[in-house]
Image (cartoon, rainbow, N blue to C red):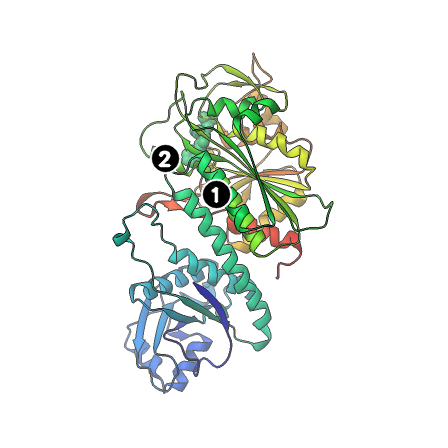
Amino acid sequence: MEFKIESGDPTTLKTPCLILGVFEQAELSGPAAAIDKASGGYLSDVLRKGDMDGETGRTLMLYGAPGVGCERVLLVGCGKRKEFDRRGYRKALAAAVNLLVDTHIDAALCTLPALDPAGMTPYQAVREAVTACADTLYRYDRTKQEKKKPRPTLKQFAVRVAREGDAETARQAVRHGAVIAQGIDLAKDLSNLPGNLCTPGYLAERAIGLGRDYPALRVEVLEEKDMASLGMGALLSVSRGSRQPAKLILMEYRGGAEGAKPVVLVGKGLTFDAGGISLKPSSDMDEMKFDMCGGASVFGAMLCALELALPLNLIGVVPASENLPDGDANKPGDIVTSLSGQTIEILNTDAEGRLILCDALTYCERFDPEVVIDMATLTGAVMVGLGRRVSGYFTTDDELAKQISDAGEKSGDRTWRLPLWDEYQQELDSNFADIANIGSRWGGALTAACFLARFTKNYVWAHLDIAGVANKTGPKKGATGRPVPLLADFLLTKSGISLE
Ligand code: BES
Ligand code: MN
Ligand code: ZN
C-alpha cells in the first residue's frame, strides 16, 4: 500500500477516483465546489435530485463528470458543517475506503483533510486520513484458506493538501501515518492469532525476527531458568500451570544520545487467560487470546521507532505466559515471592496479569529509565467504569499524565485518568503475605493499579488499562491495535519531531 501527498488544482488532477466531502443541506466542501464549477454544475444537479443528503458516512459514486481530470467522483457525506469533528471525519473516511474496496478501485485521491475537522490540526488530519484508511483496509487472513482471502485491490491512497505551503507538513504526516499504520497492523496481526499459535515462544521468535530485520534493535529473551535464577517467583508461578514455557522478551533500541535515559514500554503478554484454578466462565473465553494486546502494542511501538529512526533510547519489555488450570498451577491462598522480595498471597489466580507484570516492572529498574509505561488488558472493572472507548490510565506524575492524555487526544486513541491514591492500598492487605493480589469487590481497576504501584516506586511510571479498547467483540471481533497510536504519538513528541 502506497500513501502519498498531492497538491494542485483538484479539477485537473488525474486519478481513478476523487473523494469529495459533502455537508448536510447540500453544502459543498471547497474542493467539491471547485469540481462543481469546472463541471458546469454537475454536482449541484445531483444534489438537487436528492440522491446525496450529506449525512455522515453516506456515499455516492459518480461517473463521467464533464470537464475534470478524474475518472470518478466519490461523494462522501460529512454531516453538519458545524458538527464536523474527528468522529465524523473518521466515519466519512471509513465509508469512502469501504466503497473503494467494494468497487475494486486501485487508486484514489482524498480531499477530506482539507475540510478542517474541529479540534484537529492539518498535520493530524492528514495523519489520521492515512491511519484510518489502513485501519479500514486491514484484513486478518493468516488462518484462512488461500482461496478465501479476498484482498482489497486499493494500492495507492493519495491525500490532497489545499495550500502548497502545507505540503512539507503533510509529507511528514503521511510518513508518520504510514509508519503508525504499520505498527498498528503488526499489533493486530499478533493479537488476532489464536492462543495455540501465538504462544510465549512465538512472541519471542517474532521479537528475534524483528531484531533480524532491524539491526538497530537488540533482542534478548530470558528463559524460565534465567527468570528462576533472578528470582521472578510471581511471573513463574503463573506459567507453572502451563505447558508453554514463559518468556521475558527484551527489545532494546538505542537511537538517542549515549547515556540518555531510556523510555521503557512494558506490555502484558498473556497469550491465553483461562483464569487458572479460578477458572473463567466459558462464554466468550476465546477472547482471552487478546490478553497479550499490551505486549503486541509494545511490538507495534518499537516498529514505529525503528522505521522512523527516532532519536531516543527505547526499551520494550514483554512478559509472556499462559494462564491455565493444571495440577501444578497456582492455587488460591498460595504465596509466592516476587523479584522485588515482596511476598504475594494469590487469592484469585485470575488476577495473573499483575503477577507477571510486577516482576517485569521490578526488572526495569536496571535500565535506569526516564519513564516506564505499562499497557495491560488488566481488569474487566475498567470497562465497567469507562466503557470500551477509552483506556484508563494511572500515574502520580502530573507531567506524565498530561503527556499521555495529550498523546491520546492527538492520535484519537483516548484515555481517562483514574485515581492512584494510597487510601486504596489497604485493600491489598494480606494476613499471610506482604500483599494480596486482589482487593475487595469494588474499584477493581484501581486496586490492580495499586498493586503495580508497589513495584514501581523507583522511577516515574504510568499504567494503561486497555482491557476495554484492545479488541472489539461481536460481529467485528478482532484486535484494534490500540494503544499503538497513543504510544507512537508519545514517542514522536518525546523525540521532539512531532509536528503540531
Ligand atoms: N485478562 C483479564 C482482564 C480482562 C477481562 C480483560 C475481560 C478483558 C476482558 C484479567 O487477567 C482478569 O482476569 N482480571 C480479573 C481480576 C479479578 C480476578 C480481580 C477481572 O477483571 O475479573
Ligand atoms: Mn485473568
Ligand atoms: Zn488476564
Residue 414 seen: no
- Residue identified by numbered label 2: 196
- Quadrant in which residue 111 is drawn: bottom left
Image quarter for ligand 2 equals top left
**Residues at circles 2 and 1 in contact by the CB criterion of under 8 Å:** no
**Quadrant into which the N terminus falls:** bottom left
Q: Nearer the viewer, residue 387 or 132?
A: 132
The label on residue 206 is 1
At x 50% / y 45%, what residue is drawn?
A: 209
Q: Nearer the viewer, residue 257 or 413?
A: 257
In this image, 421 relative to 114: left or right?
right
Q: Is mark 2 within 8 Å of ligand 3?
A: no
In this image, 497 relative to 415: left or right?
right
**Measured from the top left, where is residue 258 in percent x and y?**
73, 47
**Measured from the top left, where is residue 483 in percent x and y?**
50, 46
Graded by Cα atoms within 10 Å as few (under 14), some (14 to 19) or many (20 or more), the crowding at tag 2 reads: few
**Measured from the top left, where is residue 60 in percent x and y?**
31, 70
Q: Is 112 above or below relative to 137?
A: below
Amino acid identity at mark 1? Arg
Q: Tag 1, which secondary structure?
A: helix
- Quadrant in which residue 336 is drawn: top right
**Measured from the top left, where is residue 340 in percent x and y?**
63, 24
- Quadrant in which residue 395 is drawn: top right
**Quadrant into which the C terminus falls:** bottom right
Q: Nearer the viewer, residue 181 or 115?
A: 181
Q: Tag 2, which secondary structure?
A: loop
At x 37% / y 26%, what residue is drawn?
A: 280
Q: Residue most toward the right?
A: 259
Amino acid identity at mark 2? Asn
At x 69% / y 42%, what residue is drawn?
A: 370
Graded by Cα atoms within 10 Å as few (under 14), some (14 to 19) or many (20 or more), the crowding at tag 1 reads: some
Q: Is mark 1 within 8 Å of ligand 3?
A: no
